[in-house]
Image: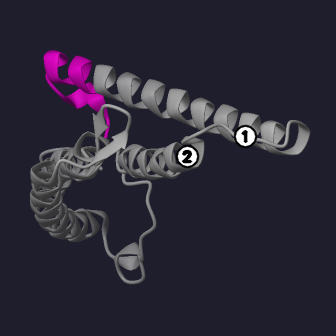
């Protein structure tokens, strides 16, 4: 979504959030590659392994995948089926996009709610993931990612609705 049409404070906040998301995604991906490489070297050269790395790598894959989904949702750069709306006039296409944005927000809001309930149930169990880190902390990415995607699509919904009403240029 273009930030030039947003109030300066909101545009700045979105740029900071984007910078944070990108930095976190790069850091986690670098950590994942480094740990996997180290694990391969330890297994092949030293005939041993780093304790807990396999479980941490599985968790990092989840975090990187969900942060990647958040990044893809920034400008609706995700997998989508666009069979009919590509032949519609621009304003009607924006209206259809607004409807799909609303559907996406609804689905992501439901996923956020249920992911939050899942994290709460894991918190009640009290199981540990790594040393002193509880499982529920590692799973916080689930509601956080879906909430961020819903928020991004809320901004896109406003943008597409304004386009469909002729209040913004397409």
The number of numbered badges drawn on the structure is 2
Which residue is farthest bottom? 84
Horizontal side, residue 105 vs residue 22: left or right: left
First-in-chain label (1 vs 2): 1
Residue 132: percent from the left, percent from the top? 31, 31
Residue at figure coordinates x 71%, y 41% from the top left: 49
Q: Quadrant of residue 144?
A: top left
Horizontal side, residue 154 vs residue 37: left or right: left
- The question of residue 38 being in magenta is answered with no
Q: Measured along the vertical axis of the image, is residue 60 above or below residue 17?
A: below
Which residue is farthest right? 45
| Type of secondary structure dominating the magenta stretch | helix
Residue 47: percent from the left, percent from the top? 84, 43
Residue at figure coordinates x 65%, y 37% from the top left: 50
Q: Quadrant of residue 22?
A: top left
In this view, the residue in front, 64 or 34, is 34
Query: Which residues lie in the magenta part?
Result: 1-14
Q: Would you say the residues marked 1 and 2 are in contact, meaning their CB atoms lie under 8 Å apart?
A: yes
Q: Nearer the viewer, mark 1 or mark 2?
A: 1
Residue at figure coordinates x 16%, y 60% from the top left: 118
Identify the residue position indicated by label 2 in the image: 57
Category of crowding for the residue at label 2, using alpha-carbon neighbours closer than 10 angstroms: few (below 14), some (14–19), many (at least 20): some
Identify the residue position indicated by label 1 in the image: 39
Q: Does residue 17 appear in the picture of this structure?
A: yes
- The question of residue 3 being in magenta is answered with yes
């Amino acid at each position: 979504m273009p930030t030039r049409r947003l109030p300066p404070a909101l545009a700045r906040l979105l740029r900071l959030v984007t910078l944070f998301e990108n930095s976190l995604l790069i850091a986690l991906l670098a950590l994942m590659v480094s740990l996997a490489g180290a694990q391969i070297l330890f297994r092949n050269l030293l005939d041993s392994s780093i304790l807990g790395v396999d479980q941490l790598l599985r968790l990092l894959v989840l975090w990187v995948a969900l942060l990647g989904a958040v990044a893809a949702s920034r400008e609706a750069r995700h997998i989508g089926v666009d069979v009919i709306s590509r032949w519609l006039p621009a304003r009607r296409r924006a209206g259809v996009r607004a409807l799909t944005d609303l559907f996406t927000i609804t689905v992501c809001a439901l996923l956020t709610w249920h992911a939050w309930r899942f994290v709460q149930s894991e918190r009640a169990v009290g199981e540990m993931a790594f040393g002193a880190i509880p499982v529920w902390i590692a799973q916080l990415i689930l509601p956080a990612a879906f909430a961020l995607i819903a928020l991004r699509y809320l901004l896109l919904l406003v943008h597409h609705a304004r386009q469909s009403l002729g209040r913004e240029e397409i």
